[in-house]
Image (cartoon, rainbow, N blue to C red):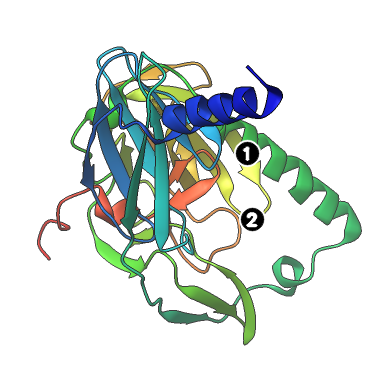
């Protein structure tokens, strides 16, 4: 067998491996920018998203989250136990975001010193580490509840303009409430960050719900749990406050899939009374 034939056979074998349809997937959830989808594959199937392996539970469950400005066309690569490959492609619904103008922010918050900027950088690294947890826990499967009920004063994705100056978009949902209002866990999990006072976000709490999904709670008055604590859905974990860069008491609740910021409103039913 000459070299040309051997090369041709190797190419055909490789091509057959790539194009054979193997694993199948069932997808549900919010197919939109800022959304979270839930996947189901046969146990033993590996899932890749943007080149990285996604955690899959022993019974084949997984999640994938999409940020505020996620690309519309999305692709999942599925590799079954026999190394057969399938491709799942779908499109997200694009979103348009509000512009929110907020005045009354102190000059110190608007133009922090170099020393403060270094502090902000350290605190951002702490929060990023807390959001990076890829635990096997499966509290993400729970039907999420509101951590606080009240008037929604700020929405996910909005372009923030502070004192007339455009700043980063808002990655959470703001719920107006008086200082001391109980904050309950929207789902069970483990506390990965309990910081008494970050420069921008004030007293800050992050809870891991498993498979990369976490909740962040910002501008708190009191934190009632500590890092490493296991918590259950509905447990009081903090109190609403006005710490950090704010103009009044409220809860800024955020949902993260690793470093992607998702829309919390897509995980809960309509706000009671709305």
Q: Nearer the viewer, residue 49 or 192?
A: 49
Query: What is the number of the mark on residue 144?
Result: none
Residue 29 horizontal/vertical position (percent): 23, 47
Q: Nearer the observer, disc 1 or disc 2?
A: 1
**Horizontally, is 273 left or right of 80 in the view?**
left
Q: For marks 1 and 2, give the CA distance.
A: 15 Å
Query: In front here: 134 or 79?
Result: 79
Decide which of 261, 21 is in the foreground and name it: 21
Which image quarter holds the N terminus? Answer: top right
Q: Is residue 138 left or right of residue 156?
A: left
Residue 252 visible in the shown view? no
Residue 128 disc label: 1
User: SS class of the residue under badge 2?
Assistant: loop
| Secondary structure state at the residue bearing disc 1 | helix
Left or right of 82 on screen, residue 142? left
- Up the image or down, 141 lies above or below 245; here it is above
Residue found at the far front of this picture: 1
Instruction: Mark yes or no: residue 28 visible.
Output: yes
Quick check: 100 above or below 149?
below
Residue where numbered disc 2 is placed: 200
């Amino acid at each position: 067998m000459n070299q040309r034939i051997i090369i041709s056979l190797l190419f055909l074998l490789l091509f057959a491996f790539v194009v054979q349809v193997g694993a199948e997937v069932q997808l549900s959830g919010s197919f939109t920018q800022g959304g979270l989808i839930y996947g189901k594959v046969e146990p033993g199937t590996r899932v890749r998203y943007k080149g990285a392996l996604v955690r899959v539970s022993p019974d084949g469950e997984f999640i994938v989250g999409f940020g505020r400005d996620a690309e519309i066309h999305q692709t999942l690569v599925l590799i079954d136990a026999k190394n057969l490959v399938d491709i799942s492609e779908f499109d997200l619904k694009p979103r348009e975001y509000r512009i929110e103008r907020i005045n009354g922010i102190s000059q110190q918050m608007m133009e922090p010193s170099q020393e403060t900027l270094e502090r902000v950088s350290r605190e951002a690294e702490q929060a990023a580490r807390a959001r990076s947890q890829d635990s096997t826990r499966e509290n993400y499967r729970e039907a999420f509840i509101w951590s606080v009920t009240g008037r929604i004063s700020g929405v996910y994705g909005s372009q923030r303009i502070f004192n007339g100056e455009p700043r980063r978009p808002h990655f959470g949902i703001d719920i107006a409430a008086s200082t001391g209002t109980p904050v309950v866990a929207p789902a069970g999990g483990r506390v990965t960050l309990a910081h008494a006072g970050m420069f921008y976000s004030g007293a800050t709490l992050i809870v891991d719900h498993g498979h990369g999904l976490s909740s962040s709670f910002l501008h708190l008055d009191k934190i009632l749990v500590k890092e490493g604590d296991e918590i259950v859905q509905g447990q009081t974990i903090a109190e609403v406050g006005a710490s950090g860069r704010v103009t009044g008491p409220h809860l800024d609740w955020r949902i993260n899939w690793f470093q992607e910021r998702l829309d919390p409103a897509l995980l809960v039913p309509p706000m009671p009374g709305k």
